[in-house]
């Protein structure tokens, strides 16, 4: 990799000219840093596929669990979630809301605390099936017990100050301004102000608890925020799978197929902020439901 980026030859020439061992050591440390930077910068993330078709785990000598039971098991100090065929799950959500990576490992930051929703971003039709790419998201922020230990003046991560999108990653530090209670849950409120392009003072707040996150700003109605758990997941659905729309629930609209729903979505939701509540069997969607939050804000 060093030769590929023309680093090796130039470093060799510089070292020859150095007369001080101290300088040589410094250059050596710089080489290590450069190698690490190259490796990190050029890493590529693969698309994820929710699936219950998994590799079997070889049983270690200290394997002490009932291999016929589905659920969490610990192997060599690492927890895995197994199906009833004793195969561990990868690249999917567990029933208790943990996203598992390609190795079957979980991460507390990639866990559903509120409701799991799916944000479709693209789709293709193959035969009578739909391959739908999208983001697995959470309506909640974190475990409520953890949020209950935070107070005014503490730091939390939110979307950007002037960001009004719904589906997003939380990557901006903000200070907790106050604590309120909503639906019986202790809720953290952040506050920030800034001047827009017209020179007007804008005030921006985020409300955070285990079940929901929403934003509120000057001249804007409150809007829901969906915390991205995993990007670019590919799910499968039959084109004639019935999609239950929000209007249909109130008797204003007839049921539609998943294919018709996606056609309407591409026409009317170009900003990709649309989400569904879904029920999965592996990577297969057997039920998708519209939610009222799509029309909030």
Image (spheres, rainbow, N blue to C red):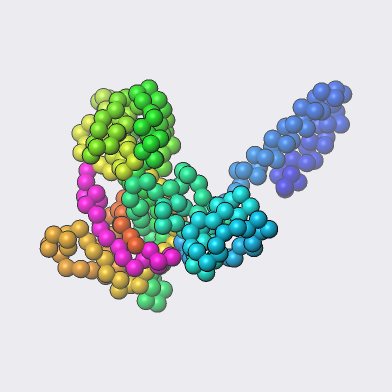
Dividing the picture into quadrants, the one containing residue 203 is top left
The residue nearer to you, when weighing 83 against 133, is 83
Q: Position of residue 246 (x, y in %)?
A: 20, 58
Which quarter of the rendering shows the C terminus? top left
Q: Residue at x 55, y 62 (%)?
A: 66
Q: Position of residue 74 (x, y in %)?
A: 57, 53
Q: Is residue 2 above or below residue 11?
A: below
Q: Residue at x 83, y 35 (%)?
A: 13
Residue 192 visible in the displayed image: no
Q: Which residues are magenta?
A: 280-297
Dividing the picture into quadrants, the one containing residue 193 is top left
The residue nearer to you, when weighing 71 against 188, is 71
User: Going by the image, does 200 lie left or right of 9?
Assistant: left
Q: Position of residue 129 (x, y in %)?
A: 38, 73
User: Going by the image, does 71 lie left or right of 250?
Assistant: right
Dividing the picture into quadrants, the one containing residue 25 is top right
Q: Residue at x 20, y 38 (%)?
A: 221
Q: Position of residue 100 (x, y in %)?
A: 50, 54
Residue 104: in magenta span? no
User: Going by the image, does 37 lie left or right of 143?
Assistant: right
- Give the residue furthest to the left: 251
Q: Residue at x 31, y 43 (%)?
A: 211
Residue 292: in magenta span? yes
């Amino acid at each position: 990799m060093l030769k590929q980026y023309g680093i090796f030859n130039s470093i060799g020439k510089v070292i020859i000219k150095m007369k001080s061992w101290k300088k040589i050591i410094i250059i050596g440390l710089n080489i290590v840093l450069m190698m690490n930077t190259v490796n990190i910068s050029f890493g590529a993330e693969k698309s994820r596929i929710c699936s219950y078709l998994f590799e079997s785990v070889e049983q270690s000598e200290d394997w002490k669990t009932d291999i016929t039971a589905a659920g969490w098991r610990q192997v060599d100090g690492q927890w895995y979630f197994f199906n009833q065929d004793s195969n561990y799950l990868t690249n999917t959500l567990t029933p208790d809301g943990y996203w598992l990576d390609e190795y079957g490992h979980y991460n507390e930051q990639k866990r559903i605390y509120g409701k799991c929703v799916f944000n479709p971003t693209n789709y293709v039709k193959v035969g009578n099936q739909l391959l739908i790419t999208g983001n697995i998201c959470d309506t909640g922020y974190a475990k409520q017990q953890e949020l209950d230990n935070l107070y005014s003046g503490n730091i939390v991560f939110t979307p950007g100050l002037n960001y009004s999108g719904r589906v997003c990653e939380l990557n901006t530090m903000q200070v907790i301004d106050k604590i309120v209670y909503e639906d019986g849950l202790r809720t953290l409120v952040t506050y920030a102000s800034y001047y827009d392009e017209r020179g007007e003072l804008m005030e921006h707040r985020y409300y955070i608890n285990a079940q929901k996150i929403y934003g509120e700003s000057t001249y804007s109605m409150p809007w829901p925020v969906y915390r991205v758990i995993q990007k670019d997941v590919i799910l499968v659905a039959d084109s004639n799978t019935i999609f239950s729309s929000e209007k249909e629930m109130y008797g204003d609209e007839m049921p539609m197929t998943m294919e018709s729903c996606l056609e309407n979505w591409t026409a009317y939701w170009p900003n990709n902020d649309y989400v569904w509540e879904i029920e999965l069997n592996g990577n297969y969607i057997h039920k998708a439901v519209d939610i009222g939050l799509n029309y909030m804000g």
